[in-house]
Amino acid sequence: MDKFVVKGPAKLTGSIRTDGSKNAALPIMAGALLVAKGETVIKNVPPLRDINTFIKVLEFLGAKISYDPGKAVVTIDAGQLTSNTAPYELMRQMRASFLVLGPVLARMGEAKVSLPGGCSLGSRPVDFHIKAFAAMKAKIEEKSGYIIARGKPLHGDIIYFDRPSHTGTENLLYGAVFAKGKTTIINAACDPEVIDVAHYLNEAGAKIHGAGTPTITVEPVGKLNAIEYTVSGDRLVAGTYLIGAAMTSGDVEVSGIEPEQLTMVLRKLEEMGAKVNSTKKKIRVQGPKRLGPINLTTFPFPGFPTDLQACMMAAACTATGTSHIKETVFVDRFSHTMELRRLGADIQVASSEAVVNGIEGLQGAEVMAPDIRAGAGITLACLSARGKSEILRVYHIDRGYHQLEEKLASLGADISRQPM
């Protein structure tokens, strides 16, 4: 088990390219299970713990997979699926594993999938998935911690989500591709990763319309083809570096990302006093001597992403004045506040709202990463703190960031990975 050792304060400067999006790569890999003949080649897949875990899930189902982390290429042959069951010992490690429900059900007519695990972020129900497949005439039962779905073919219908669901939308796309009749998803998630999944499926032969809008329609097809597809850049990793530049009075340019995917984040950084410049595939952020306060509310895309809330809270800790942060996506996503307080931050939390009174400087301390995104925010806070910090449980961070410590070191941070 490793830890990060940080000596601050740092000033992040330089250029860096973001990795491929984990939250797009995982569902695209799941979508490859729909391809019954040939090899699907997925490029720009980041070498992360979650990717390796998901490969084990797909291999358990019978898919043949090769992965070259150096070239960031995954090759999947799902021609002979041998199991319709995704077991708990693998599913418990990450919520994204539940994405195999749709393609396995569509391919095999029956899927037995363990209820998912992953980061502890309060209630993250899969009710949307279950109700949607039930509306498509699948028979659903829950037994011994597993969801068992049966139905072939599924029947297209008009599906209404109470609120946008990222994985729910993607799972339903898989089920609708081979369904009998057209499927319409109302209040679908508009996230860039959902658009990426729809682009992949369409290039493979699907007929999906409206991805990126609240209404998506799917006309069924008979098969999908094996293709090569390149995953888009990771907006959350890019946003982490850019927020880090702003809060350390730095100057960082991130490439490989479309600025439109981070519009709300960039606007909030500008409100705090950072200077933002962007081109088609690059974003540059220059931080002021000290950021100003911010009011923000997390919301599904195109709102402010919940996955960058911890990073923005870290930035608010040393800003002037008082910042207000409201979390509306996950009911329990303020676990990082306790760790930020160990660094000296002045934060009060009541229900889904946090009030951050900015101070002139944080002090180094021993802290831990409660989950992927909280760990990234805590790491940024340690970069801005005076003195030495040690960050424990960095295996959480490794699930979503490839060699975060090396990337930050390349931008001028004094940070290293050391064994416990």
Image (tube, rainbow, N blue to C red):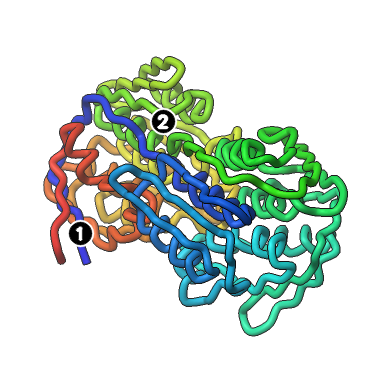
| 363 displayed left or right of 91 | left
For the point 82% across and 47% down, the residue is 183
For the point 34% across and 48% down, the residue is 401
Nearest the eye: 55 or 343? 55
Location of mark 1 (residue): 3
Q: Is residue 188 above or below residue 13?
A: below
Please name which of the two marks, 2 or 1, marks the residue nearer to the observer.
1
Give coordinates of residue 230: x percent, y percent.
47, 36
Callout 2: SS: loop
| 195 displayed left or right of 57 | right
Across the whole image, how many numbered discs are drawn on residues?
A: 2
Q: Residue furthest bottom?
A: 144
| 43 displayed left or right of 196 | left
Nearest the eye: 189 or 124? 189
Q: Residues within 10 Å of mark 1 (few under 14, many from 20)?
A: some
Callout 1: SS: strand
For the point 21% across and 26% down, the residue is 13
Location of mark 2 (residue): 293
